Image: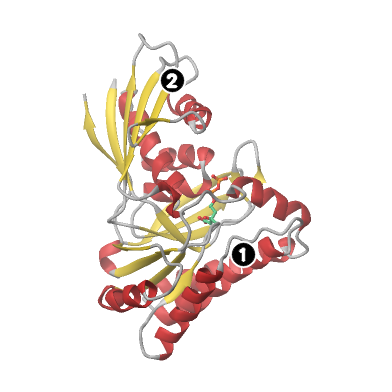
């Protein structure tokens, strides 16, 4: 009746932006991500018939805003006739750091809920359930380099390359700790309805996915960096050309992007990517991470720098 699961956030190199079906939360495009090792969310789920309603705490504090989404996710895993649940979420990184906290949270939630409900569900089924709650969460069920593909009316998620096979690091420059102006789900809808570039974004995605997939399998950092930066800037161009425009960047975001380009011209193998927020994530060989970190730390407006290696997928850590 009670289970605990751990999941890590993931960073998309080829981005998910746009939904094919809002009700089922089906992405309009495939995506490729890397799962982190050192940042995690632990999710403790206990179904308890004595509870009148679901309860959720985030790092010890009662959380009302996320509760309806969590309850819907529990329904998809354990059925709507389930007992109410007490859900405790603990993350070892700041939720406001723009690190896809919903990805690690919902990935851990489906694993813990399924464990607490007594089931033994296959990972691909858990990934589909996590994706219903948050598209990027489906990828955190798997470790290393992960591809989410579209398959008929559903999604298909798999590891392309294990984390150990290519030990890259991710260095995150946190440039703003405030809440984002528009959540990614709503922003995607605005983009779909209003950006003149949206159709082209969707049409181009299979080519970027193929290029990135080949670069990952060949462990070609330069080729991966070229396509990942291009894909990221294309996604942000769709956002900027939406009405109203969706601009997540600040001055430090841009300074960090320039810093990564300068590092590259001085021989450091690194590329940047930016999600629906102002934080900049640099991907580089583990040995280059200290140099990237030092460069980010010297930029005015950078509030914190986090570093992580690549790791495994979501897993059950306890069941009682
Ligand atoms: C920019 O997974 O947060 O990070 O399905 O609405 O929960 P929902 O969206 P979400 O979107 C992630 C968008 C992104 C790119 C990515 O992670 O692929």
Using the image as rendered, state which of residue 133 and residue 115 is in the foreground.
133
**Mark 2 Cα-neighbour bin, 10 Å: few <14, some 14–19, many ≥20:** some
Q: Which residue is mark 1?
A: 235
Q: Is residue 120 visible?
A: no
Q: State the image quarter where residue 38 is shown.
A: bottom left
Mark 2, secondary structure of its residue = loop
The residue depicted at 65 percent of the width and 46 percent of the height is 186
Q: Position of residue 285 (x, y in %)?
A: 31, 75
Residue 268, relative to residue 242: is it above or below? below
Which image quarter is the C terminus in?
top left
Crowding near the residue tagged with mark 1, few <14, some 14–19, many ≥20 C-alpha atoms within 10 Å: many
Q: Is residue 5 above or below residue 233?
A: above
Query: Is residue 231 something one can see in this rendering?
Result: yes
* Horizontal and vertical percent position of residue 127: 44, 43
Horizontal placement of 268 versus 248: left or right?
A: left
Q: Residue at x 33, y 32 (%)?
A: 60
Task: Please state which of the two labelled residues, at mark 2 or mark 1, is closer to the viewer.
Answer: 2
**Please, which residue is most extreme toward the top here?**
50
Name the one closer to the observer, 238 or 129: 238
Give the numbered dot on residue 54. Answer: 2
Does the beta carbon of the residue at mark 1 sit less than 8 Å from ligand 1? yes
Q: Tell how many labels.
A: 2
**Dot 2 or dot 1, earlier in sequence:** 2
Most distant residue in the bottom direction: 266
Q: Residue at x 21, y 32 (%)?
A: 318
Q: Provide the secondary structure element on which disc 1 rests.
A: helix
Q: Position of residue 190 (x, y in %)?
A: 72, 51
Q: Quadrant of the N terminus?
A: top left
């Amino acid at each position: 009746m009670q289970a605990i699961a751990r999941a890590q956030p993931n960073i998309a190199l080829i981005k998910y932006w746009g939904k094919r079906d809002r009700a089922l939360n089906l992405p309009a495009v495939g995506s490729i991500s890397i799962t982190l090792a050192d940042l995690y969310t632990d999710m403790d789920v206990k179904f308890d018939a004595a509870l009148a309603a679901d309860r959720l705490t985030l790092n010890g504090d009662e959380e009302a805003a996320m509760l309806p989404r969590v309850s819907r996710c529990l329904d998809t895993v354990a059925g709507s006739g389930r007992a109410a649940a007490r859900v405790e979420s603990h993350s070892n990184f700041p939720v406001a750091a723009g690190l896809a906290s919903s990805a690690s949270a919902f990935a851990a939630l489906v694993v813990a809920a399924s464990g607490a409900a007594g089931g033994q569900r296959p990972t691909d089924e858990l990934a589909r359930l996590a994706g219903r709650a948050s598209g990027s969460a489906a990828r955190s069920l798997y470790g290393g380099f992960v591809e989410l593909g579209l398959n008929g009316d559903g999604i298909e998620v798999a590891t392309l390359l294990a984390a150990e096979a290519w030990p890259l690091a991710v260095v995150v420059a946190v440039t703003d700790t405030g809440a984002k102006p528009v959540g990614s789900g709503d922003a995607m809808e605005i983009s779909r309805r209003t950006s003149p570039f949206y159709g082209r974004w969707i049409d181009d995605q299979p080519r970027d996915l193929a290029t990135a997939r080949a670069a990952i399998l060949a462990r070609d950092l330069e080729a991966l960096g070229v396509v990942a930066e291009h894909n990221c800037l294309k996604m942000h161009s769709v956002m900027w050309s939406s009405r109203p425009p969706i601009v997540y960047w600040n001055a430090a975001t841009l300074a960090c992007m320039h810093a990564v380009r300068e590092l590259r011209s001085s021989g450091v193998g690194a590329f940047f990517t930016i999600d629906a927020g102002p934080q900049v994530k640099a991907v580089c060989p583990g040995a280059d991470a200290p140099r990237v970190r030092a460069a980010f730390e010297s930029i005015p407006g950078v509030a914190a720098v986090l570093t992580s290696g690549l790791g495994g997928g979501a897993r059950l850590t306890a069941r009682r």
